[in-house]
Image (tube, rainbow, N blue to C red):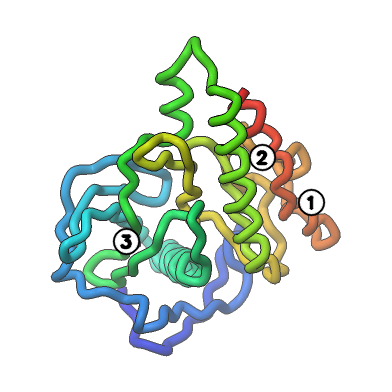
Amino acid sequence: MSYSEGETRNVIVSNGSITAAEELTIDHNLLIDPKLLFIGSKIGEGAHGKVFEGRYGDRIVAIKVLHRGSTVEERAALESRFAREVNMMSRVKHENLVKFFGACKDPLMAIVTELLPGMSLRKYLVSIRPKVLDLHVALNFALDIARAMDCLHANGIIHRDLKPDNLLLTANQRSVKLADFGLAREESVTEMMTAETGTYRWMAPEVSAPTALPKWTKKLVYNEDWSFFLLLISLC
């Protein structure tokens, strides 16, 4: 399924995923020619897609290929999620956010970003056990995460899946960058949201409640301080 530039589609999906009409448009300037992409070996996999090492022109990149779904409703919801992720990633630039290069809509839904040579923060913390991070390094990581969050929040974006798996180390292992905007939302979104969004272990208690949260709890949903607090503990 593909859409022409400027086309919109009304999408209504149960369980609070999408409850109103959303534009599925992506600025033409953000789209890249799939003929310039070479997809190599798989380096990661999540609920919504797979990540491959690849090449875009003369760049070594990470290519996130998203699932399209098997039903009309599922395809519409996933395409809307894809467009939202692309548009949000293109809006923000910061040294502690993974750099966005562009996206493809057809024949694959794919997002192209910089490929960081380091591992995820989770894998790094596991690899140094039983040792712990040097205090100076831990403080630098904490500041990196805080700066990334501050940039997103200043642009009205809530990541909603803040955890060590989504923080990638740079080559010198002295800095981290926040990745994966698949669950991110704009702060202005007002639809009822299902509570179970993100990774359970890293959610605030009020967010991990098993029921949809009413509008008055919106600020609680969008409060990522709890996830940040848990990250700080994991760095110690």
Q: Amino acid at mark 3?
A: Val
Q: Is residue 111 left or right of residue 83?
A: left
In this rendering, would 234 be left or right of 177?
right
Q: In the visual, does 114 lie left or right of 12?
A: left
Q: Residues within 10 Å of mark 3 (few under 14, many from 20)?
A: many
Q: State the quadrant of the N terminus.
A: bottom left
Task: Work out whether mark 2 precedes mark 3 in sequence or the reverse, and give the earlier one.
Answer: 3
Q: Which mark is residue 220?
A: 1
**Separation of disc 3 and disc 1 at Cα?**
32 Å
Q: Residue at x 54, y 22 (%)?
A: 134
Residue 167 at x, y percent in the picture? 48, 42
Q: Label 3 belongs to which residue?
A: 112
Disc 1 vs disc 2: which is toward the camera? 2
Pointer 2 local density, CA inside 10 Å: few below 14, some 14–19, many at least 20: some
In the rendering, at what x and y percent does residue 87 appear? Answer: 48, 72
Residue 197: image x %, image y %?
Answer: 61, 48
SS assignment at label 1: helix
Identify the residue at image location x=25%, y=72%: 106
Task: Tell me what residue is drawn at x 85 percent, y 60 percent.
Answer: 216
